[in-house]
Amino acid sequence: MNTKLTLTIQKEILEKAKEYAKDKGQSLSDLVENYFKLLTKDERKIKPKQLSPRVKRLRGILKAQSNFDYKKTLEEELRKKYEK
C-alpha cells in the first residue's frame, strides 16, 4: 500500500534530485523509496521488480552460447588487464 509523504528540502537540492532521478530513469518517489529501503534493510537483495526501467530494458539483450563460461572469460580478461 502506498501512502503520501510530505518533505521539506532546499529548492536547489530538489532540482538536482529531480535531474538525477530523470537521468536514472526513475521517479523522484522511487528514488526516495529506494533510499529508505537501503537505510532500513539489512540485506540488499535486488529483485527484478526493483530494477530501474533502464536496467530492465537492457536485461536479456545479449544472447550467449549455451556453453559460455562467463567466469572463465572474466578470469582471462582480468588476467590480461593486470599482467601488463
Image (cartoon, rainbow, N blue to C red):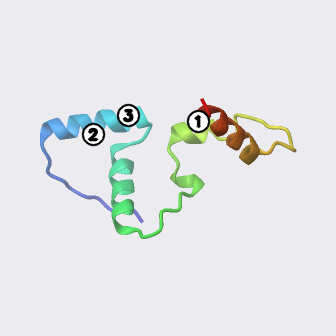
Residue 26 pos. (x, y %)? 42, 41
Give yes or no for contact between labels 2 and 3 (Cβ–Cβ under 8 Å).
no
Mark 1 or 2, which is nearer the eye?
A: 1
Dot 3: element: helix
**From what the image shows, is residue 38 above or below residue 32?**
below
Q: CA distance from mark 1 to mark 3?
A: 36 Å
Picture residue at 36% right of the left edge, 48% below the top? 31
Query: Which amino acid type is shown beneath numbered disc 3?
Result: Lys
- In the picture, measured across the screen, residue 14 lies left or right of residue 56, that is left
| Camera-side residue of 74 and 80 | 80
Q: What's the distance in space between the residues labelled 1 and 2, CA to CA? A: 37 Å
Residue 72 locus on image (x, y percent): 75, 45
Label 2 CA crowd tier, 10 Å (few <14, some 14–19, many 20+): some
Q: What is the secondary structure assignment of the residue under circle 1?
A: helix
Q: Percent x, y for residue 8?
A: 14, 51
Direction from residue 55 to residue 79 in the image, left or right: right
Q: Quadrant of residue 65?
A: top right
Point out residue 51 in the picture as x, y percentages from the top left corner. 53, 48
Under circle 2, the secondary element is helix
Q: Amino acid at mark 2?
A: Ala
In this orientation, which residue lies closer to the viewer: 84 or 4? 84
Residue beneath label 2, please? 17
The quadrant in which the N terminus is found is bottom left
Q: Is residue 20 left or right of residue 50?
A: left
Q: Give the residue drawn at x 63%, y 39%.
A: 78
Instruction: State the mark number for residue 22.
Output: 3
What amino acid is found at the position of numbered circle 1 in the picture? Tyr
The C terminus, quarter of image = top right
Residue drawn at the location 56% of the way across and 54% of the way down: 49
Identity of the residue drawn at 25% across and 58% down: 5
Residue corresponding to mark 1: 82
